[in-house]
Amino acid sequence: MKIWLKRKLSRFSRSENGSSTIEFAITFPSVIFLMLSGIELGFVNLHHSMLERAMDLTVREIRLGTGAAPQHDEIKDRICARAGFIEECGNNLKLEMVQVDPRNWAGIDANPDCTDKSEDVNPVRNFVNGLDNELMILRACAKIDPVFPTTGLGANMQKDDFGQYSLVATSVFVQEPR
């Protein structure tokens, strides 16, 4: 009985049948993990670049425009119209505009105030239209749903209670004289 078992185990250890299946079973999950993380990273970059571009175009329009300075809702609508890939932009975007003194720099709060669908919507955090030749900081924070929220990068991103991550775009400009 021992000799028979020894021969079977020896033959089994030398056999190469099914070796490609084992390699596939080991490498397939990691390849899928990397592929889904790459797709998620691509969408994060797409959303962020569209938000940055929309902010740049809107700030340029504000900076060069003559006449009345646009108010919060108008600026938000302009950004949302230009940021094509941000879903429900009107609900998921929060703006903050602060006047700062360039000679006595204090900056703004490092933590942006973003909307969170799991909480009650707060009013505008701070939004002050600048006077002529004042330095203004405009910050937009958008909440985005991950494409693959349970896999790869989407599972490891810092998200709010509703499962969305934050994208922040900041722009600085000087209010031109009218």
Image: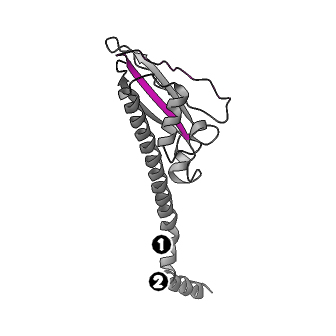
Say which of 151 and 102 sits in front: 102
User: Which coloring applies here?
Assistant: one colour
Point out the image quarter for the C terminus: top left
- Total count of labels: 2
Residue position for label 2: 14
Type of the residue with mark 2: Arg
Disc 1 versus disc 2: nearer the observer: 1
At which x and y percent is residue 8? 56, 86
In percent of the image, x 40 and y 16: which residue is there?
A: 100
Picture coordinates of residue 132 (x, y %)? 37, 15
Q: Is residue 104 left or right of residue 41?
A: left
| Tag 1 residue | 23
In this picture, residue 167 sits left or right of residue 178: right
Secondary structure beneath disc 1?
Answer: helix
Would residue 61 be found to the left or right of residue 39 on screen?
A: left
Question: Which residue is painted at 52% across and 43% down in the image?
Answer: 157
With respect to residue 14, does 156 lie above or below? above
Q: Which mark is residue 174?
A: none
Please, what is the three-letter code of the amino acid marked with disc 1? Glu
Q: Quick one: label 1 or label 2, which is nearer the N terminus?
A: 2
Q: Is residue 134 magenta?
A: yes
Q: Secondary structure at mark 2?
A: helix
Tell me the quarter of the image containing the N terminus: bottom right
Was residue 8 drawn as part of the magenta stretch in this picture? no
Asked if the residue at tag 2 contacts the one at tag 1, i.e. Cβ–Cβ closer than 8 Å, the answer is: no
Q: Residue at x 64, y 40 (%)?
A: 162
Span colored in magenta: 120-143
- How far is mark 1 from mark 2, CA to CA? 17 Å
Q: Nearer the viewer, residue 142 or 20?
A: 142
In this view, 160 is above or below 47: above
Which residue does the image show at 37% across and 16% down from the upper left? 134
